[in-house]
């Protein structure tokens, strides 16, 4: 499978991180910002030459880092030391980033089991079989857990008990999809989601009724909308694997603006603009009205995520390079090499409130930087 398709295979897990407005400042010049605090090798057993590919992302809450792996384990690490707080074997590979609601951490397995555990003790609260692989991050709204399954179904449950309220099943007629799902985006009492048939839709939270849907892809195959639709200013920003980035009216889904960027990362928001990564390795700064303000090609590989860190910007890619940029000039200030041309970041980087950076590579290496 090509790296291009693997990128979009992984885009559905990008909704983990909270988007926030940024205050742009040039970073303090430093020789090497990528100082490894601790690292873990999480490879499962595999046959020589048949590399298992990790597409998930770490999840950080306060002093803890939660990371699932292809061995079927969810592990809660102490963020400062890397010491295991608890480990649970779930009997199925985990490619779903965890998320937390209340005192509970939630995640799913490739076998379709949704698991809820106490965030600190790891004690099981409940597990429920949802019938299809879980590869996207659970999201929450008004006490409900919302998740997009691998079979193009949206399921809404009671977050406390696991009781299923409703399901919406999307019919996807294309055989040439990227075989992935986007993370849902709770939005003003509704649910925004991209589908593998090239559409973005808004569903009601209470019943799962479609309020509107809009086709945004211009392609005839691999038309998937795998980047989570995101609210930016007065628009919904959405992009597909086969077409430009769209600015949608959240009231009715009408396409109001088109920007010629093939989007491959979640937008990273400023006051009146945002950064976004593209499949050609370019980082763009775009105004909330759709004007491209600046652009810089930083890699030959597609961009998978953007995060602010140490007053600079971390850019993960679908190749072995992780870059540190000046967010004003977009110049590359430093680079971290993941160590193999088979390495990439198909998930996203995670940054804690006190500035610790975590990255999970496709070779199943977890890196934590101070």
Image: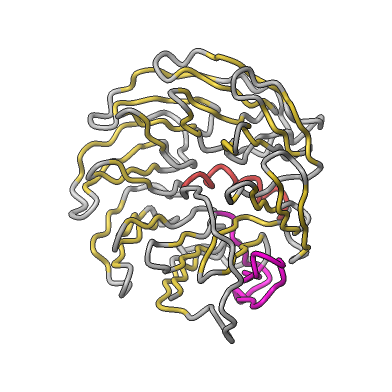
Q: In this view, does 245 lie above or below 153?
A: below
Q: Which residue lies furthest to the bottom in this view?
A: 31
Q: What stretch is highlighted in magenta?
A: 320-347
Residue at screen point 77% across, 44% down: 291
- The tally of labels here is 0
**Front position in the image: 9 or 131:** 9
x, y percent for residue 115:
31, 40
Q: Does the magenta stretch include residue 44?
A: no
Q: Quadrant of residue 244?
A: top right
Q: Which residue is drawn at 68% across and 57% down?
A: 303
Report if residue 302 is visible in the image: yes
Residue 23 lies left or right of residue 237; in this view the side is left
Q: Quadrant of residue 235?
A: top right
Query: Compared to 41, does 120 lie above or below?
Result: above
**Residue 168: image x %, image y %?**
49, 18
**Residue 108 sits above or below residue 128 on the image:** below
Find out whether residue 322 is within the magenta segment. yes
Question: Which image quarter holds the C terminus?
Answer: bottom left
Residue visible at 38% across and 61% down in the picture: 353
- State the image coordinates of residue 254 (x, y, percent, origin top left): 70, 21
Identity of the residue drawn at 65% across and 23% down: 172
How did the renderer colour the structure? Answer: secondary structure
Any part of residue 181 in sight = no
Majority SS type along the magenta span:
loop
Query: Residue 161: x percent and y percent?
Result: 23, 29
């Amino acid at each position: 499978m090509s790296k291009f398709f693997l990128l979009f295979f992984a885009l559905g897990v990008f909704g983990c991180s909270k988007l926030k407005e940024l205050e742009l400042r040039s970073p303090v010049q430093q020789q090497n910002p990528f100082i490894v605090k601790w690292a873990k090798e999480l490879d499962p057993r595999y046959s020589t030459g048949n590399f298992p590919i990790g597409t998930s992302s770490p999840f950080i809450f306060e002093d803890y880092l939660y990371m699932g792996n292809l061995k079927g384990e969810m592990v809660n690490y102490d963020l400062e030391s890397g010491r295991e707080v608890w480990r649970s074997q779930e009997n199925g590979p985990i490619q779903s980033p965890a998320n937390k609601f209340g005192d509970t951490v939630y995640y799913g397995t490739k076998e379709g089991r949704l698991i809820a555990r106490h965030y600190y003790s790891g004690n099981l609260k409940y597990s429920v079989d949802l019938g299809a692989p879980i590869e996207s991050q659970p999201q929450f709204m008004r006490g409900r857990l919302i998740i997009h399954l691998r079979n193009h179904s949206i399921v809404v449950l009671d977050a406390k008990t696991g009781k299923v309220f409703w399901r919406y099943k999307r019919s996807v007629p294309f055989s040439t999809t990227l075989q992935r799902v986007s993370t849902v985006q709770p939005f003003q009492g509704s649910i925004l989601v991209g589908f593998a048939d090239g559409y973005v839709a808004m569903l009601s939270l209470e019943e799962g009724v479609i309020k509107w849907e809009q086709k945004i892809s211009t392609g005839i195959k691999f038309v998937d909308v795998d980047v989570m639709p995101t609210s930016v200013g007065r628009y919904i920003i959405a992009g597909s694997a086969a077409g430009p980035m769209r600015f949608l009216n959240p009231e009715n889904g009408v396409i109001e603006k088109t920007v010629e960027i093939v989007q491959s990362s979640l937008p990273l928001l400023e006051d009146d603009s945002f950064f976004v990564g593209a499949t050609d390795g370019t980082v763009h700064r775009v105004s909330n009205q759709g004007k491209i303000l600046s652009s810089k090609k930083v890699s030959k590989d597609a961009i998978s995520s953007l995060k602010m860190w140490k007053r600079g910007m971390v850019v993960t890619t679908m190749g072995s390079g992780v870059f540190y940029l000046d967010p004003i000039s977009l110049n590359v200030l430093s680079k971290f090499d993941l160590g193999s041309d088979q390495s990439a970041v198909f998930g996203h980087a995670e940054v804690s409130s006190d500035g610790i950076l975590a990255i999970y590579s496709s070779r199943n290496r977890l890196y934590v930087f101070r």
